[in-house]
Structure formats: C-alpha cells, structure tokens
Amino acid sequence: MPATKILIVNPNTTASMTDTICAAARAVAAPGTEIVAVTSSMGPASIEGFYDEAFAVPGLIQAFLIAPDAAAGIVACFDDTGLDAARSVARFPVVGICEAALVTAGQLAKRIAIITTLPRSIVPLEDLVRRYGFADRASVTACNVAVLDLERLGSGAEQKLEAEIAHALDKGAEAIVLGCAGMADLARTLSQKFGVPIIDGVAAAVKQAEALVGLKLTTSRRGSYAFPAAKSYAGTLEPFAPRTSA
C-alpha cells in the first residue's frame, strides 16, 4: 500500500524552522504516513503580524499548486496564514495549525490559554479564536519572544515561554496551546513539566489531516471554497492567475 503523503508548508522562508516542524510532524505521524515539509520560496523570514502575513501568502499558494500528488496539506503558521486561499486551490484537504490546536484543546479542557511570541500577534490570533468559536474559552497572551529567537541559543526564549505558561495556569488555564510553529519541538517536555495538556498545532494538524484522508473526505467545492474563477492577474502576480475554475 502506498504511503499517505501529507505536505506541510512553512509559509516563512526560514528553512531551519521547517526542519523543526518536520521533526515534530514525523514524531506523531502514523505508520504509512509520509511527511514532506517544504519552505516557502518567497516572503518574510518570520511571520509576526498582519503585514508579514500578507506577503507570505503567494509563496504558500505556490507550494500547494506545485504539489498535486499530496493526500492532504498543512499550513504551518499559527496565524493560519492563507488557509482559506489554500483550501480554494489545493486539490486535497488543507488543515491550519491554529484551528487544529484549538479543536484538539477543546476536547481536553474548558479554559485554554494560547501563548504566542510577540504582543503584535495577539490581536490576529484573537480574531482567529473568535472565528473558530472559542472566544468564550480561549485567551491569547505573548511571551515577548521574536519568532527567530526561538532558535537562537542564549535568547532566553524557553525561560520566557515557561514563565508565561506558569502565569496562564495561575490565572486558571487548564490547557496550553503553543502559538507558534517554531515551538513545535517543546510541547512534550512542557506537558511533562507542568502536568497539563500542552498542544502543538503541528502535531494536532498531522493527526487531523490523517483522519480526513482516512475518512476519504476533501474540501467542499460548493460555495466558499469553490475553485477560483478564471481571470487575468497583472504585474508580479500574473503567474498566480486562475487558469480554470475546475
């Protein structure tokens, strides 16, 4: 039986972060699941706020368009960068790590704390929390660590993250969601240290992608995620113009 190929796209251009994401995904993947992780070929080195997110979308979409043989895809940015656009063009189901993490955490606890990197990311994630129906159950705070500092030795990133987890638990959180794909390798250790479920969105997305493939379900093309209508695009974005609606 051929392996089930899950394509994970890191929408930023930092390849070392893709390696971290890939390792976390492979650690939870079922036998028979092939994890293929790719780094966006264009865009910001990290995604921190609305501006970075906007310029990360073309590279993300390009990565999905050139990989038609995948059984499922994952957007490996906690902002769920370009998720709706990716679902509109990918010919397989696409899972976002924020949505996957919240759905998973919601089955384990009532009060959820999402801990992200910088304060500027709080409002975009609060928007997602409301959109996904968790506004009454999930709060968002930041540990004040730049995304790229998660990989920099001596940055104090882990200590700041642990301090914010402890603060969230003191305020009544029952489960923690790590609000950055660059934290993917920390969930298991932190769960053991704090004695509560600590959810990494990458791992959660892998298991949900596997479930969709196992259920033989894919994205609905009725309404919201119908393939884009063919039309011309101008300038630098001309290669992204939809050529056909099916």
Image: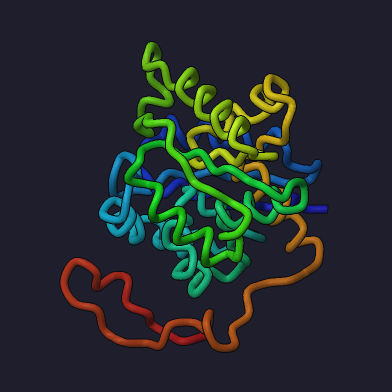
Q: Residue at x 68, y 56 (%)?
A: 103
Residue 142 in the image, given as x and y percentages of width and height: 43, 37
Residue 23 visible in the current orientation: no
Q: Residue at x 41, y 88 (%)?
A: 229
Residue 189 in the image, given as x and y percentages of width and height: 66, 22
Q: Residue at x 42, y 44 (%)?
A: 39
Left or right: residue 199 versus residue 231 is right
Residue 168 in the image, given as x and y percentages of width and height: 57, 34
Left or right: residue 99 versus residue 81 is right
Residue 232 in the image, given as x and y percentages of width and height: 26, 84
User: In the current view of this chain or complex, which residue is farthest to the left?
Assistant: 235
User: In the current view of this chain or complex, which residue is farthest to the right?
Assistant: 1
Q: Residue at x 41, y 57 (%)?
A: 60
For the residue pair 62 and 149, the one nearer the viewer reads as: 149
In the image, residue 34 above or below residue 151: below
Residue 20 visible in the current orientation: yes
Left or right: residue 20 versus residue 42 is right
Splitting the image into 4 quarters, where does residue 12 fall? top left
For the residue pair 22 and 175, the one nearer the viewer reads as: 175
